[in-house]
């Protein structure tokens, strides 16, 4: 059998071993750091000092460099303005030279006569005196009279390479024919490739244009003058951003070109600008910052320029400051380490003593003391710890006594008290609870009790201290038990379970049953005499007993009206008794067109509302879905809502009844502008035998069962009823 051999490359094995060693090293360092408070005290300050050192060095250096850069930018702007000023001075020199030459005695007559020799003889000495490098004189017909260029040896030679009259500035002045026209300026490129800055001025004789004189300065001379005055390198841009000349020794003009868009911006700028987002210009290993502006003289913009200053000083300053501050912060870090170690030792030694004492107390040795005598926070902590150990035993005895009292109180309570924990298990807290739970378990009633508690938890989620009303009664043998519950929570709101109080209400239930039987019996017994009273009253009103005077008719109408009220009250009592006996109303459903059904009811009450001075508004659509309903019960519920609105709305008010279909439901609303219902009354408005306490109408009577029974009828039809109201503004059901 062959031995297994690791065939991985040696480099892969070495890499894995190195990674494992690094991971192990970091784990060791972390364990050392995590095991000592001293390291936890020193390390954050050390890291903070390092971060502050780096940020401080960066911020200070940046602030200093920003200051230097701001001075550099200001110097660039100043140099750019000097360039503009110098160009204006050159322009003034051109105009002065042009006047000196053009108005030499005898030159204008010679120009008019076309005497080339005389013009040459008179103009050249004056041009030499003004140190003019380029001179062109044209008569009013556009013919060249004199066209010369100053040579390096100091003599003027005729220019034959191109026609001077082709210059746009010459043609513009001749075309204007205006002897008082403003001078024109332009950069002219000669066939030799040299650029000249030229100024054309009209030659005037007694208000008539007799010719044009052009004076020019070479780009070389212009750049030298700009460099000497601005004390910065200068670049001239023409023809859409092309660099045509500069003062840099490495005169690679193609590298200095700018985009046409930037050139167009410069032509329209009012002043010199430093573009902060522009990258520095790099030439010959050196970086330069630029300021750019338009070459503008008078109203003419002849091109653009840039002035450049080196960035070497800024780079050197940044490096020097960075090194100085790095050294300072390194020394500060060393001081932090030494000072932090001393401070940490002062803290960790007594903390160790506290830890030893804590372990002893945790093991049950309440006689252990820390032995620390200091006046700082650690001393206060040690003193508090010693006092805590002294009081711990006292508090333990107090808790045992309190627990004993609580057990005695629970044992003396006649009601059964049960704790349901978070797992749903029941724990009896007194003897009565044990007996009841045994009876419930024997009667298989623990499952309904669990369902009740689950329902309670769903209804009271998020609420504290809310007692559940009597949801269900349990019959244990001949006993009737009711259940009340509440959450058990800590002060922090954590739920520990539910406390359940089970009470024997057998006697109360018997009394309620007796009361319900009495109400039912009395209601049935009262119906017969009331029916007779109602019948005979209506018979007398119809004239069966003879003619009635007004007083007799009023008496009989009052008897009939109050008889109707008594019949309505008895019907409420009977419905109430039926609900109390069976839990729900027994309905006899049949198809109903609600719009016609409700309009029929409203027609009965419209005369009564008009007699009271109320206005009835209806919003009932012509077509609605057919619903299955008990017409007698539903009619009674609707009548009760409409009658309430009529009774509780003062004269001059409005009652609005609306009906609409929405989401497989039919919504019926009754709104009024009556006295309204307070928020306190709204909470109990649908309780049995409850009547609103702020009623001011003296003729409003009732048992307080109308809304209670109406709610039962609507809920029996699987519907809901609610109210929105404000005191003095009315109500909507």
Image (spheres, rainbow, N blue to C red):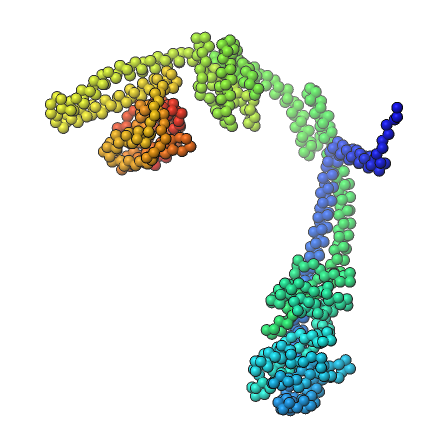
The residue lying at 64 percent from left, 89 percent from top is 114
Q: Quadrant of the N terminus?
A: top right
In this view, the residue in front, 199 or 32, is: 199
Residue 223 appears in view: yes
- Identified at 18% across, 23% down, the residue is 538
Q: Position of residue 728 (x, y in %)?
A: 33, 36
**Viewer-nearest residue: 62 or 713:** 713
Q: Residue 521: percent from the left, percent from the top?
A: 30, 13
The residue at 69%/83% (across/down) is 147
Percent x, y for residue 206? 57, 88
Is 563 displayed left or right of 281 in the figure?
Answer: left
In the rendered view, would you say 105 is above or below 709?
Answer: below
Q: Residue furthest front?
A: 1
The location of residue 706, given as percent across then percent down, is 33, 24
For image coordinates 67% across by 33% down, the residue present is 377
Q: Is residue 458 above or below residue 341?
A: above
Can the viewer see residue 25 in this picture?
no
- Left or right position of 3 against 437: right
| The quadrant where residue 576 appears | top left
């Amino acid at each position: 059998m062959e031995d297994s051999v690791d065939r991985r490359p040696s480099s892969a094995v070495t890499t894995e071993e190195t990674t494992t060693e690094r991971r192990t090293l970091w784990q060791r360092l972390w364990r050392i750091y995590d095991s000592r408070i001293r390291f936890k005290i020193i390390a954050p300050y050390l890291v903070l000092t390092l971060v502050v050192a780096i940020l401080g060095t960066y911020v200070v250096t940046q602030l200093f460099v920003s200051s230097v850069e701001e001075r550099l930018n200001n110097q660039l702007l100043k140099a750019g303005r000097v360039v503009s000023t110098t160009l204006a001075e050159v322009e003034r020199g051109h105009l002065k030279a042009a006047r000196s030459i053009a108005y030499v005695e005898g030159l204008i007559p010679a120009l008019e006569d076309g005497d080339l020799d005389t013009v040459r003889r008179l103009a050249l000495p004056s041009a030499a005196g003004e140190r003019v490098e380029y001179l062109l004189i044209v008569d009013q017909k556009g013919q060249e009279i004199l066209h010369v260029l100053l040579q390096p040896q100091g003599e003027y030679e005729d220019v034959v390479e191109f026609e001077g009259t082709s210059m746009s500035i010459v043609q513009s002045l001749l075309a204007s024919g205006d002897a008082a026209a403003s001078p024109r300026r332009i950069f002219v490129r000669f066939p030799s490739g040299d650029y000249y800055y030229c100024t054309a001025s009209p030659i005037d004789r007694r208000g008539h244009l007799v010719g044009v004189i052009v004076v020019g300065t070479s780009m070389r001379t212009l750049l030298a003058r700009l460099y000497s005055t601005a004390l910065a390198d200068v670049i001239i841009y023409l023809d859409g951003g092309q660099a045509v000349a500069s003062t840099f020794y490495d005169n690679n003009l193609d590298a200095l070109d700018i985009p046409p868009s930037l050139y167009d911006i410069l032509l329209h700028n009012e002043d010199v600008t430093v573009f902060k987002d522009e990258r520095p210009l790099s030439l010959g290993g050196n970086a330069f910052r630029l300021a750019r502006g338009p070459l503008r003289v008078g109203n003419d913009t002849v091109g653009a320029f840039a002035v450049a200053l080196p960035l070497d000083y800024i780079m050197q300053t940044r490096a020097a400051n960075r090194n100085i501050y790095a050294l300072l912060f390194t020394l500060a870090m060393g001081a932090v380490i030494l000072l932090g170690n001393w401070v940490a030792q002062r803290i960790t030694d007594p903390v160790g003593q506290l830890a030893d004492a804590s372990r002893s107390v945790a093991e049950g040795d309440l006689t252990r003391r820390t032995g620390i005598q200091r006046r700082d926070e650690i001393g206060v902590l040690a003193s508090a710890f010693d006092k805590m150990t002294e009081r711990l035993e006292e508090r333990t005895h107090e808790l045992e006594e309190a627990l004993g009292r609580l057990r005695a109180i629970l044992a003396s309570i006649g009601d059964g008290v049960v704790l349901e924990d978070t797992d749903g298990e029941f724990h009896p807290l007194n003897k009565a609870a044990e007996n009841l739970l045994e009876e419930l378990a024997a009667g298989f009633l623990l499952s309904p009790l669990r369902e009740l508690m689950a329902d309670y938890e769903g209804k009271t989620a998020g609420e504290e201290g809310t007692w559940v009303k009597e949801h269900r009664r349990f019959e244990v043998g001949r006993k009737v038990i009711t259940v009340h519950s509440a959450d058990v929570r800590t002060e922090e709101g954590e739920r520990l379970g539910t406390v359940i109080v089970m009470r024997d209400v057998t006697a109360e239930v018997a009394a309620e049953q007796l009361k319900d039987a009495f109400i039912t019996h009395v209601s049935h017994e009262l119906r017969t005499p009331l029916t007779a009273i109602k019948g005979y009253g209506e018979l007398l009103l119809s004239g069966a007993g003879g003619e009635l005077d007004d007083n007799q008719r009023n008496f009989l109408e009052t008897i009939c009206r109050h008889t109707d009220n008594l019949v309505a009250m008895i019907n409420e009592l009977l419905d109430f008794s039926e609900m109390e006996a069976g839990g729900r109303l027994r309905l006899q459903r049949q198809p109903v067109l609600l719009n016609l059904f409700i309009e029929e009811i409203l027609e009965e009450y419209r005369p009564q509302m008009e007699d009271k001075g109320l206005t009835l508004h209806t919003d009932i659509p012509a077509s609605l879905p057919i619903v299955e309903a008990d017409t007698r019960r539903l009619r009674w519920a609707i009548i009760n809502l409409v009658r309430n609105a009529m009774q509780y709305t003062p004269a001059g008010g409005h009652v609005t009844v609306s009906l609409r279909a929405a989401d497989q439901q039919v919504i019926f609303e009754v709104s009024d502008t009556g006295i309204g219902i307070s928020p306190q009354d709204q909470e109990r408005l649908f309780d049995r035998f409850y009547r609103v306490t702020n009623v001011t109408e003296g003729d409003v009577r009732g048992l307080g069962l109308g809304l209670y029974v109406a709610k039962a009828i609507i809920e029996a039809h699987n519907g809901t009823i609610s109210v929105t109201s404000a005191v003095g503004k009315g109500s909507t059901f």
